[in-house]
Image: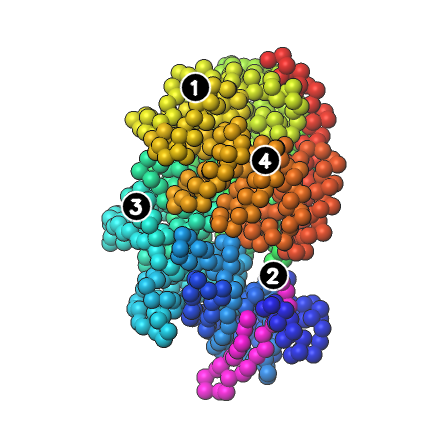
Amino acid sequence: MARLSVHIAAALFALSSTTAVAQTAPPGELSNDARPLSYRIDLTVDPSKERFSGKSTIEIQVTRATDTLFLHGNELKVTRVQAARGRAAPISAAYSQPLTTGVAQLKFARPLTPGRYTLSFDYDAPFRTGAEGLYHVKVGEDWYAWTQMEPLDARRMFPSFDEPRHKVPFTTSITAPAGQKAYANTPLVRSTPAAGGMVRHEFAPSKPLPTYLVAIAVGPFDEATATVPANAVRRTPLTLRHIATKGQAPRLGYALAETPRILSMLEDYFGIAYPYEKLDQIASPIMGGAMENAGLITYDDTLLLLDKDAPPSQQRGFGNVVAHELAHQWFGNLVTPRWWDDIWLNESFASWMGDKVGSQWRSDLGIAGNQLQGALGAMNGDSRAVGRPIRQPIARNEDVNSAFDGITYAKGGQVLEMMEAYLGPDVFRRGVQRHLKRFPYGTATAEDFFQSIGTEAKDPRVIAAFQSFVTQKGVPLISVRPAAGGGVTLSQQRYRPIGVEAQAGQRWLVPVCLRGATGRQCTLLTEASGTVRTPGAGWVMPNAGAAGYYRFDLDQAGWERLIAAAPQLTGDEAMALADSAYASFAAGRTSFVQVLAAARALSSHPERLAAVYIPGQLTGLEETVLNETDRKAYQALMRDLFAARLTGLGLDLRRGAYAKDGAERRQLRQTLLGYVAGEGRDPALRAQLIAAAEASLAGDEGALDPSFRALAFAVAVEDRGEPFMNRLHEQLIGSQDPLFRRNAAAALGTSNPALTTRVLALSRDTRLQNLERLTILFGLLQTAGTRDAAFAHVIGNFEEHQKLTTGFGNALLGIGSGYCSAAKADEVDAALRPRLASVGGGELDLDRSLGAIRQCAALKAEKGAEISAALAGG
């Protein structure tokens, strides 16, 4: 209704068609006709209602005479707009929203002349039900509200110049029902009674912020506090407050105890004290991730709420993500990108820094491998026919969501890792510190960052090397061959898997480091080829330390020597070996027999992620390429690779049975069990898991450790069917344990094909949170036996699922990515492309999904028979 009314208002005021108005509205960056200087936002928020209201003012500087300004507002019902200047009579304006992306128009009764004005707005708007804008959620019997503004959703809460370049102070007040708490970016100054049983909460003015970092929350929250001690960088203590929905305070203890250490490590790295007045961290049940709002960081419940016996995997998620979001307080918040084409630097740096500091915090949790694991996954997407560079020009609002993907987070993070390894940690750190000190509380571009690093490196090639990776899509392939007269020849080209056409003419400035049994040799490969000395006799690892963002290729003798030397490689190097060995097969360069040889050689590697990397790739084949006979051989292979190692670790599913084991050993046991019982379908282990799952649901709290719960529930749903599924569903609805709820939802999405209709019905249960419903649905979309029915269900109820995925970008455009035939790619295209307009863009996301389908089909056609033969041969 609101959208319809603003279009009518625009038409009446302008006396022209809506189309004519839309043609004048900027599709991307706003003009410089006006810029904001500060905001005051006064909100009335009752989370139990359907709408909230606001009175807001923006101090602006008008740069040229105009009777029309464009800014942002999305589904706001604006009832009054005025522009005031000194003692002059206010100038009224008509408000309209000509573009569905939230570009709004102000048409003034008379022109504004250059100078300072105060824009004032009265408005109301709907709460969102997904994690975008100001959203509300019912938890138990209570309603709560949170915000999620990045990238383009501040405009859903208040009229604004909703672009990162506009970084100014905000002053906020929230009028909320008595008995409810209210939070904002800054400290609370005062709370006073208001009419109608409400209380007005006023907050201190903020330091300069972009709109996407503005945050509030309202509800009957629990709180817990701690103190971050002073240190050499920050001379005064800092109060740390953690916030969660009612009844969750006991689960805040772990995060409250561990966050101070992570924060202090970041302060030490940056050499700058935490840059904001307060630090609150708040949990939300539908966040699905986290957001670095200045002074009020929001996390998914499962990241901040941990039981005393939380599994290592949940502890790892906590440490990694908290380090990521806290790193943003400097990189992204203190210094902010000017425009969305540089958002990659925000996220790349926080991902890289989160892994670095997270590993420093708890080296036993395996966080160090997160960056590389993500980067190797990003290489798969970066190798496809359709893609984008890290730094992609963004001309339209519709394209902003596509910038938040694995290329931004993981590829960008690995490029930073590569450059740090090449320059040395001290030089790189000084460059980072220089950058932050050049632009405090301001904005900067990628070129500014490159210049900061290059100045400290005293090497202009650093800037060119950065640019070669940031401005080009694709993955370099470094081929290593013996050179005449000794040493090795390195040559570079773009990595091209089967099903992707060759791309000629690409070249990168690649820092390449080789390692052998007795030495290491590095070079900056600036040309198509070059020769370097061999780092010792025997095997050569072409990506020493696995810091480089590239894949490598060897001759057959080189592969055999390196695979045989797998036990001598570091964990990260072993992962890089696994990735390049599989990628070489996927490009048609080596055989599937060699892939299996590498899998066997790595299966006993101490690094968990390296041991299971190739089996993880084979799991993808199991759902797409393999026939029923192949699947039996695949299951036998999984058991053969890992059953003995699992037996050596021992298996007791009872709660706390391995409390005295180190985190590495516990995670390895959990992972191997997934491959032997889940992928390998070992009948004895599955029976053991089912018995523990059923005992747990029957009330025996000691029967099943949380580390094994997700797998046990999934196996029981698959093998016990509807009776167990129904009990699990009912307990999910009644549970207040965030991790249990997420485990249960994931298990419901692993249904066998006979139960698909019933599970699809469960995915529509409104007693579940949106994120839980999506977890169930996307589980069905990932499984071959349930994919067709789930896809048809989403297409048949597209509008319902579009609302369900609010806050999750263009997730619906990837629902067909698990298919593996050209015909299916055409069907997916026909079903989804006509819906791009209603989704609000996302052509790139859809095209990448279709590219993945067609690439899989090409691999199946060319290598399917070879895969079958190799699996049959054991």
Indicate the colouring scheme.
Answer: rainbow
View extreme (front): residue = 723
Q: Is residue 309 magenta?
A: no
Across and down, in percent, residue 275 comes to: 35, 55
Instruction: Locate residue 44: give its quadrant.
Output: bottom left
Residue 101 disc label: 2
Residue under the image location 48 percent in, 26 percent down = 674
Which label is found at residue 755?
Answer: 4
Q: Is residue 487 above or below residue 79?
A: above
Is residue 82 in the magenta section?
Answer: yes
Q: Secondary structure at mark 2?
A: loop
Residue at 61% from the left image edge and 39% from the top image edge: 757
Of labels 4 and 1, earlier in sequence is: 1
Q: How many residues crowd around disc 2 within 10 Å: few (fewer than 14), some, or many (20 or more)?
A: many
Estimate the spatial distance between the alpha carbons at disc 3 and disc 2, rounded to whole Å: 41 Å
**Amino acid tagged 1:** Leu
Q: Earlier in the sequence, mark 3 or mark 4?
A: 3
Sooner in the amino-acid sequence: mark 2 or mark 4: 2
Three-letter amino acid code at the position of disc 3:
Pro
The three-letter code of the residue at mark 4 reads Leu
The amino acid type, in three-letter code, at marker 2 is Thr
- Dot 4 lies on which element? helix
The relative height of residue 558 versus residue 497 in the rendered view (above or below) is above
Q: Is residue 597 left or right of residue 661?
A: right
- Distance (Cα) linking label 3 and label 4: 37 Å
Q: Which mark is residue 646?
A: 1
Q: Where does residue 772 sit, x and y in percent of width and height?
A: 50, 45
- Return the residue at label 3: 250
The quadrant in which the C terminus is found is top right
Q: Residues at badges 4 and 1 in contact (C-beta under 8 Å)?
A: no
Q: Quadrant of residue 707?
A: top left
Q: Callout 3: 10 Å neighbours few (<14), some, many (20+)?
A: some
